[in-house]
Image: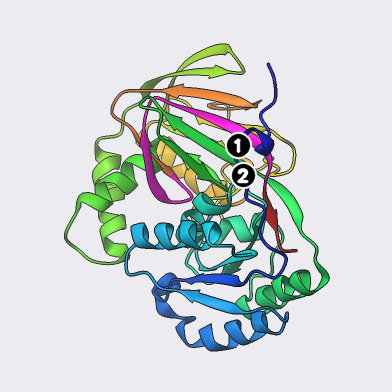
Amino acid sequence: MLAVTAADHPSVAPPADGPVAVLANPAAGRGRHRELLPQLLERLAAAGRPVELLRACTAEQAEQVCHAAVAGGAAALVAVGGDGTVHRALQAVAGTAVRFGPVPAGTGNDFAADTGFPADPLAAAEVIAAALREGRSRPVDLARITGADGVRRWYGAVLAAGFDAIVNERANRMRWPRGSRRYDLAILVELARLRPRRYTLRLDGEPVETDAVLVAVGNGACYGGGMRICPDADPTDGLLDVVVGGRFDRRTLIRVKPRIYRGTHVAHPLVHSYRARIVELAAEGITTYADGERALRLPVTVTAVPRAVHLLR
């Protein structure tokens, strides 16, 4: 099967003197880095290029203004926030020549961490500014999701299609309680309802059918703020790592879940790992989450796209 490359998609060649567009989410990380934004912009401006702060009030608007900035000639796009902010920005730069820099300022910063950016936002901004000054970038892979209706999305870290996606979906439907307690309650509700589901996968055309509780497709290793669900995933190898946790009961899942932070869960006899360029995934009643953001309902096809984004590193 032919490998898919970023060249298979329309590429935008940014002007050499184009501005640096900055998407900032002031609510990221519960707002703890909000006061750093002026310093971050100052560090980025030290690269000698004009810096334009993008304005958006919703996630959908954030995505729209990123697309507009790329279409309008931005030389680079910088996302200040967590994985959700990065996810929105990636929709605009994926498959283009517009360079990208994530400044980790959220609760979960898995894409930035997996691709080697400093955890400190100011240090990350300095790395990005240095890359801008020196005209360098590093290409890494992205994953592209295609739904049954042809809708496409991109992600950089992990696609969740099992218990974690189900919990996220329930939490997003709940109006009470607020904050992290809502997610905790959603976990309790879904643990009480836990049951393996029948999944059908095709890995580079090879069929696999299994009953499972956890299913993740990783371009990178981590999701959920450092959980190494796909511990061997490498965002430069042109492949996707698929981790499937089988017929866990509640007690076993609770016991295994903490091991995901270290990536040692893959040694459990009910966990199976695969690697493929193209992953077709189907199951009933599952809405996937990519980079922690609500994505597409199953069935989906996930494709590894080598060198799909050029990081300012």
Residue positioned 45% across, 72% down in the render: 29
Residue positioned 69% across, 44% down in the render: 235
Gap in angstroms between the C-alphas marked 2 and 1: 6 Å
Residue positioned 38% across, 31% down in the render: 249
Instruction: Tell which of 283 and 26 is nearer to you.
Output: 26
Q: Is residue 274 left or right of residue 253?
A: right
Residue 113 drawn above or below residue 97:
below
Quadrant for the C terminus in the image: bottom right
Q: Is residue 98 left or right of residue 174?
A: right
Three-letter amino acid code at the position of disc 1: His
Q: Is residue 282 left or right of residue 175?
A: right
Which SS class for mark 1? loop
Q: In the figure, residue 42 lies in which quadrant?
A: bottom right
Instruction: Tell which of 300 and 232 is nearer to you.
Output: 300
Residue furthest to the right in view is 134
Give whichever of discs 2 and 1 has the lower sequence position. 1
| Residue 106 in the image, given as x and y percentages of width and height | 49, 68
User: Which region is colored magenta?
Assistant: 290-308
**What residue does disc 2 label?**
95
Three-letter amino acid code at the position of disc 2: Gly
**What residue does disc 1 label?**
9
